[in-house]
Image (cartoon, coloured by chain):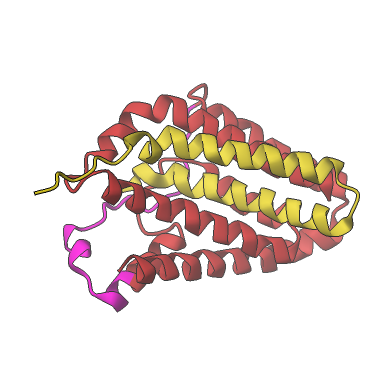
Amino acid sequence: MIPARSRPRWLLHPITAVVLLLVIGVFGAFVALTAERELAVAGALLLLVTVAGAAAGFANSGST
Amino acid sequence: MVRYFGTGLLLGAVLVAFAAAALGALPQALLPEAVRDILFGLAAVPVLLRECGLLRFPVPQNARLVPEDVQHLRQWGAMQFGFEMGTGMRTYSPSALPHLALVAIVFIVPFPAAFALAAGFALGRLAMPLLSNAWSDDGAWSQVWARSERVVRPLLALTCVGALVAAMLGW
């Protein structure tokens, strides 16, 4: 019998998820404030509000 | 089952975002941008301090625990439960960030972007059961969450407020 491969737990850690959100947010802010093409700015702004929403949703994880 | 729960989350969040955006149409049309930015800032600073543990104040919440039989729901039950959770009005709200997101929709976020914020909220809320289920079957992820809360909460607040402020500057 082949033993089950252990999952890399750090990927599932809340801090990993938060750092990922933070990095995406920094990227979105950088693009929003430096890009010259309107489409890129609009996309970055949508990404920023999505990240803000995700942070708000994830912050409620302790509610159940 | 997760698909139905996630769809419900999205629908609930979108409904609340739509209501808040409709409500926000008036202040966004009547108030100058600077005034709206200040109003948002007046809400964001105390929320940031609260999430960092420097300030304590209650936020509106439905102070009810999720019943245990929820885990035995079938598809439509999971969607209905997800919908209720997506509205943010189903159970306790340990964080004030969802409330700040609503304030942002009312004062600074343009109408179409409110739906992106709602989708983000649903995604963030969905992350918890996904990560928890992948972690283990015994709900141990909640203990990991509780142990890392002191780091996670301020970082999430910083991410949420920072992203909203950066978007505010970009608009």
- Seen at 68% across and 42% down, the residue is B163
Is B55 covered by the magenta stretch? no
Residue under the point 37% across and 59% down: B90
The image quarter containing residue B157 is top right
Image location of residue B18, percent across then percent down: 62, 69
Which chain is in red here? B
Q: Position of residue A51 (x, y in %)?
A: 60, 48
Q: Could one spot residue B58 in this view of the protein?
A: no
Q: Residue most toward the bottom?
A: B76
Q: Identify the image quadrant of residue A61.
A: top left
Q: Is residue B91 above or below residue B9?
A: above
Toward which corner of the image does residue A34 lie, by quadrant? Answer: top right
Q: Magenta stretch: give its range.
A: B56-78
B111, above or below B146, in the image: below
Q: Quadrant of the N terminus of chain B?
A: bottom left
Relative to B140, residue B114 above or below: below
Residue in the image at 88% along x and 57% along y: A38
Q: Mostly what secondary structure, the magenta segment?
A: loop
Residue sitting at x 76%, y 60%: B110
Q: Name the one closer to the observer, B132 or B70.
A: B132
Residue B163 higher or lower than B56, as above or below: below
